């Protein structure tokens, strides 16, 4: 995770059934931005929303690298 911005809108309560959503809103060679939300199932209220930027890094040097094709395919639902 390179950057995250979260807004807490309403509290969840014990035993609330929740749904977590994630949608890719931008995809570059070495990074992606996701829009995420937590929704309470009973009334469809958005409890929490956020924007998350992730970066692809080489494991040994931690330098940015191209996102592997298989990850792009999984992320796009193919």
Image (cartoon, rainbow, N blue to C red):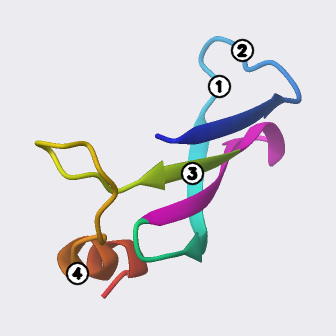
Report the residue at 60% width, 33% height from top.
17
**Quarter of the rendering occupied by the C terminus:** bottom left
- In the rendered structure, which disc, 2 or 4, sits on the residue that comes first in sequence? 2
Task: Determine the CA span between mark 2 and mark 4.
Answer: 40 Å
Q: In the rendered structure, does residue 33 fall within the stretch colored magenta? A: yes
The residue closer to the viewer here, 77 or 56, is 56
Q: Which residue is mark 3?
A: 53
Q: Give whichever of 7, 18 is nearer the camera.
A: 7
Q: Which residue is mark 4?
A: 69
- Callout 1: SS: loop
Q: Note whether 23 is above or below 74 in the view shown.
A: above
Q: Gap in Å between the C-alphas at discs 4 and 3? A: 18 Å
Q: Earlier in the sequence, mark 4 or mark 3?
A: 3
| Discs 4/1, front | 4
Q: Read off the magenta span.
A: 31-50
Residue occupied by mark 1? 16
Q: What residue do we see at 65% from left, 25% from top?
A: 16
Q: Is residue 3 above or below residue 30?
A: above
Left or right for 9, reference 1: right
Measuring from the top left, give residue 39's x and y in whole percent.
71, 43
Mark 1 and mark 3 lie on one chain; the one further toward the N terminus is 1
Q: Is residue 3 above or below residue 69?
A: above
- Compare marks 4 and 1 and give the one earlier in the sequence: 1
Could you say whether the residue bearing mark 2 is in a helix, strand or loop? loop
Which residue is tagged 2? 13
Q: Are marks 1 and 2 in contact (CB under 8 Å)?
A: yes
Asked if residue 77 can be seen in this view, the reply is yes
């Amino acid at each position: 995770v390179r950057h995250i911005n979260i807004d807490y809108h309403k509290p969840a309560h014990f035993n609330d059934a929740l749904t977590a959503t994630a949608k890719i809103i931008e995809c570059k060679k070495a990074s992606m931005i996701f829009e995420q939300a937590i929704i309470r199932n009973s009334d469809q209220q958005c409890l929490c929303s956020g924007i998350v930027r992730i970066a692809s890094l080489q494991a040994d040097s931690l330098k940015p690298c191209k996102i592997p094709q298989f990850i792009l395919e999984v992320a796009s639902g193919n």
